[in-house]
Image: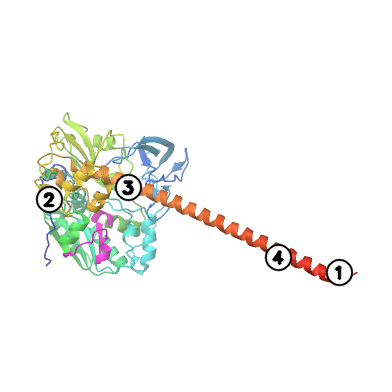
């Protein structure tokens, strides 16, 4: 039996989960086209590995990996590469950029996958290579490369934590995953324990996800999965945040600017663990995921197992299309998601939810009023920030003061927004301030590089000047000595 700890702040929110979780999960039809934004994690352009007109098969790598931070992307079904088109990216920036578009042929022809059930005899390093090659990233929303997270050196890990808390309203894809694939999740937990060399796994599930808990417990009684503890956690938002969940389950605090590995914990989403298990045991890379399609703006809210790269419009159509009340599209949940300007955008590995909000459903168009310094935002903040101070500094563009107030620690959970009686869109200010800080940092790095290049050039010039002077001196000395020798050897008349 495990005791649970509290984390600071957090709020109770209406869950709105029944809308999508009560309907059975369905497999989405093959899309007509697949869209892959050529955008890497670091914002640089990803390299396409197939050319226009080329026929590709499901599971073939189509977009390259330049490092472990940018795992490869595989075609989610077979088809012909139409080319690289300029399209809107499914990203909060709303930028237009290069996207690879594949016309799906409907055959679903696949490359040959090769996996092994006997992974216990494979070294962890080799398994990490396979996880990277299978393009696996965190499916909880952050899409952090799984192989990087599972390589915590130099830290010693004693606990694997699987996150199925899913505390954000409306989103039920993890709940659905746990109910439908409990063996795969437990198998993933066992595999990850082998990779990390740990002998305990804490599997967190929202306490309101009773069917998922029952499915997991039943699966656990049917197989040999090792020391896995299924732990219901309170449905307080944002319990599912990585640092908050670690605090709730272990009582340990991840240090500011630190990573969980520093305190001996590795945290992965439940669906990520299952995707890793599938990749290792069957060889199938990450080409699909469960996405919640929900909100009053869609006729039949439900969870869909969909191919990555499928346009949002096709998924909404699968759910019966839009209702008359549909007003706004959000990728992600109402708290941490971002608005989409159109449905002609694809789902990515990070897409856990498409929320088609009806009138007044999530956006309350209330006029922002001046801050009354009530402090409600600070009380709600789960990372103990002072949002009102951040707000003042963000408004005044005081980037240094924002750093002093730990802006990078803000997880953009939106708790402060929700409780603010003045309806100030605080998170918008923080996101914008973070972009400015990042831009300033990029400028600083650029300036540092330029300075280092200038100093290196100056140093080289100085060295060359000295070498020239030395060389001239040596030549002069040589000439002088030669002349002297000649003079000495000449006979006196
Ligand atoms: S909750 Fe809103 S009004 Fe209250 S202190 Fe924070 S920003 Fe100001
Ligand atoms: S959005 Fe940032 S500042 Fe606001 S409550 Fe969440 S972590 Fe705190």
Q: What whole-number distance in Å separates the C-alpha atoms at marks 2 and 1?
A: 100 Å
Residue 65 in view? no
Location of residue 181 in the rendering, given as x and y in whole percent from the top left corner? 23, 54
Ligand 1: give its quadrant.
top left
Residue corresponding to mark 4: 477
Identify residue for label 1: 490
Q: Quadrant of residue 384?
A: bottom left
Point out residue 337 in the picture as x, y percentages from the top left corner. 23, 43
Magenta residues (range): 250-272
Q: In x, y percent, where is residue 478?
A: 73, 65
* Left or right: residue 282 compared with residue 252: right
* Image quadrant occupied by the N terminus: bottom left
Determine which residue is flagged by label 3: 438
Q: Are marks 3 and 2 in contact (CB under 8 Å)?
A: no
Between disc 3 and disc 2, the foreground one is 3
Q: Which mark is residue 380?
A: 2
């Amino acid at each position: 039996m495990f005791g649970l700890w509290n984390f600071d702040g957090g709020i109770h929110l209406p869950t709105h989960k029944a809308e999508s979780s009560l309907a059975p999960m369905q497999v989405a039809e093959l899309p007509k086209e697949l869209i892959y934004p050529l955008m890497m994690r670091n914002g640089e352009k990803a390299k396409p590995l197939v050319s226009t007109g080329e026929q590709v098969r499901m599971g073939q790598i189509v977009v390259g990996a330049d490092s472990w931070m940018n795992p490869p992307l595989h075609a989610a079904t077979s088809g012909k590469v139409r080319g690289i088109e300029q399209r809107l990216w499914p990203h909060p920036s709303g930028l237009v950029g290069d996207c690879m578009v594949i016309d799906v042929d409907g055959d679903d022809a696949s490359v040959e996958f090769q996996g092994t059930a006997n992974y216990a005899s494979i070294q962890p390093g080799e398994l990490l290579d396979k996880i990277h090659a299978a393009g696996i990233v965190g499916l909880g929303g952050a899409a952090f490369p799984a192989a990087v997270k599972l390589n915590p050196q130099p830290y010693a890990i004693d606990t694997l934590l699987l996150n199925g808390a899913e505390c954000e309203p409306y989103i039920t894809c993890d709940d659905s995953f746990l109910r439908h694939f409990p063996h795969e999740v437990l198998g993933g937990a066992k595999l990850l324990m082998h990779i990390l060399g740990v002998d305990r796994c804490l599997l967190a599930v929202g306490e309101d996800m009773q069917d998922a808990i029952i499915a997991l417990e039943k699966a656990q009684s049917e197989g040999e999965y090792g020391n896995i503890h299924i732990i219901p956690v309170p449905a307080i938002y944002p319990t599912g945040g990585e640092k908050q969940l670690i605090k709730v389950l272990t009582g340990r605090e991840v240090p500011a600017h630190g990573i969980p590995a520093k305190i001996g914990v590795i945290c992965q989403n439940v669906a990520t663990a299952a995707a890793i298990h599938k990749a290792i045991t069957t060889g199938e890379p990450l080409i699909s995921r469960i996405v919640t399609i929900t909100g009053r703006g869609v006729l039949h809210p439900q969870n869909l197992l969909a191919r990555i790269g499928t346009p949002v419009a096709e998924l909404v159509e699968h759910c019966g299309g839009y209702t008359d009340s549909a007003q706004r599209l959000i990728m992600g949940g109402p708290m941490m998601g971002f608005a989409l300007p159109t449905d002609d955008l694809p789902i990515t590995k990070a897409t856990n939810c498409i929320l088609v909000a009806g009138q007044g459903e999530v956006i309350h168009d209330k006029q922002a009023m001046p801050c009354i310094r009530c402090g409600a935002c600070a009380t709600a903040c789960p990372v103990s920030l002072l949002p009102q101070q951040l707000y003042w500094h963000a408004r005044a563009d005081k980037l240094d003061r924002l750093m002093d107030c730990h802006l990078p620690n803000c997880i953009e959970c939106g708790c402060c927004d929700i409780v603010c009686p003045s309806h100030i869109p605080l998170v918008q200010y923080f996101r914008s301030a973070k972009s400015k800080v990042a831009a300033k940092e990029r400028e600083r790095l650029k300036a540092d590089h330029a300075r280092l290049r200038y100093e290196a050039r100056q140093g080289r010039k100085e060295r060359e000047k000295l070498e020239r002077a030395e060389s001239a001196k040596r030549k002069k000395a040589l000439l002088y000595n030669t002349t002297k020798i000649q003079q000495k050897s000449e006979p006196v008349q």
